[in-house]
Image (cartoon, rainbow, N blue to C red):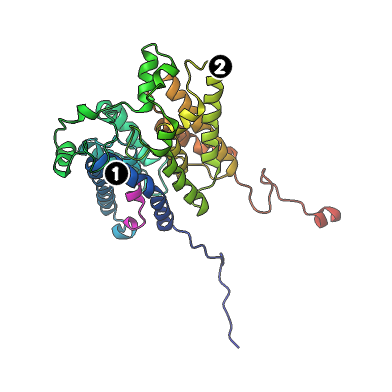
Amino acid sequence: MTQVAAVAGPYAHEANHVGRIMGHVMLALMPATLFGLYLFGWPALLLFLVTTLTAVIAEAICLKIAGKPVRLTLMDGSALLTGWLLAMTLPPWAPWWIGVVGSLLAIVVAKQVFGGIGQNLFNPAMVARVALLVSFPVPMTAFLSPTPLFSADAPNFLEALAITFGEAPTIDAVSSASVLGHLRTALTGGESVSQALDGFYNPLAMLWGNAPGSLGETSALLILLGGAWLLYKRIITWHIPVSMLASLFVIATVMHLVDGEHYADGLYHVLSGAALLGAFFIATDLVTSPVTPRGQLLFGAGCGLLVYVIRTWTSYPEGVAFAVMLMNACTPLIDHYLKPRIYGRDRRGEPLTYPDQAEKE
């Protein structure tokens, strides 16, 4: 008779792991990324390569210095994804050093200083994005009109090398404010919302992505497609994206109904800037967001509220990165008060009383 030695649990095997999660997120980002590279041409591709390669190299160096397994950790794809997300939020024709400095800030300062993957308090890509915006506001706000690859206005590969790694003499001819930046400038100049957005804002164009903006934030439809894939594969849950977008939409709609000449409507805020990318790909970071569904709803609603406040009443036309970082700081507090229920105990931690036990008592 064969005897089987009893071993400790758990006995259930979960196929999910970091590499699988990162792979699905990158797959979900692929449509919006490819469209952004097509829309803004060779300079965008060069910037994307610089940003992602720097992130991977910086991660390898940090792991080597810390005496951690380099190849095994790099294979999980987390460093590549951090550089990828950062590239999506950069102006598509930004110079190479913006990508290098941003990736170093994200990997070294925001991730490895805290101990590596799973230890960081703030989203690394958003830390880099905020630091770059505060430190280098001119190149970080130099957006341009779409110049699709192989179109008449698009630079060829050699011109793209000059734009990314040297001077960019042609950028003035095609530069344009983002939709959010254009509205902020117009309102400051005394124009109304309707006057500012007339001929500059088209919801259908924003949905498809044919508008000035960051490299991977322009196509709302493709970002939604990627978000739907993450929900389908259960990489993320609906709580943060829905609560973030709903709170942003509701607040903007109410303010627009109160004074439509000074406040844009909810659809404008949801379709513009990084709202959708942030809701599905950034705020849902498993490390820096709450663990419970109720906490995630609160976290997402806070992000939406802060995005609207920053866009409307501060000097920055975009607020997703700031909002996510501020709510990242609140995550430990949210998890403290909205703890998950322990199996066999109520939400206060007291043991559950079962019917037969209650009858004996």
Q: Residues within 10 Å of mark 1 (few under 14, many from 20)?
A: some
Give above or below for 171 relative to 111: above
- Foreground residue among 350 and 35: 35
Task: Name the mark nearer the viewer: 2 or 1.
Answer: 1
Residue 98 image point, x, y percent: 24, 36
Residue furthest to the top in view is 190
Main secondary structure found in the magenta portion:
helix
Please give the count of numbered marks on the rendered protein: 2
Give above or below for 333 relative to 28: above
Mark 1 lies on residue: 38
Q: Amino acid at mark 2?
A: Val
Judged left or right of residue 114, residue 361 is: right
Residue at 33% x, 60% y: name it.
Answer: 72
- Foreground residue among 120 and 126: 126
Residue 210 image point, x, y percent: 35, 36
Residue at 17% x, 36% y: name it.
Answer: 163
Mark 2 lies on residue: 258
Residue at 29% x, 59% y: name it.
Answer: 71
Residue 75 image point, x, y percent: 33, 58
- Foreground residue among 191 and 99: 191
Q: Is residue 81 magenta?
A: yes
Q: CA distance from mark 2 to mark 1?
A: 40 Å
Give above or below for 266 relative to 152: above
Residue 108 shows in this picture: no
Q: Is residue 350 magenta?
A: no
Which comes sooner in the sequence, label 2 or label 1? Answer: 1
Q: Amino acid at mark 1?
A: Tyr
- Mark 2 element type: helix
Residue 26 shows in this picture: yes
Q: In the picture, residue 129 is in which quadrant?
A: top left
Q: Which residues are magenta?
A: 73-83
- Foreground residue among 167 and 205: 205
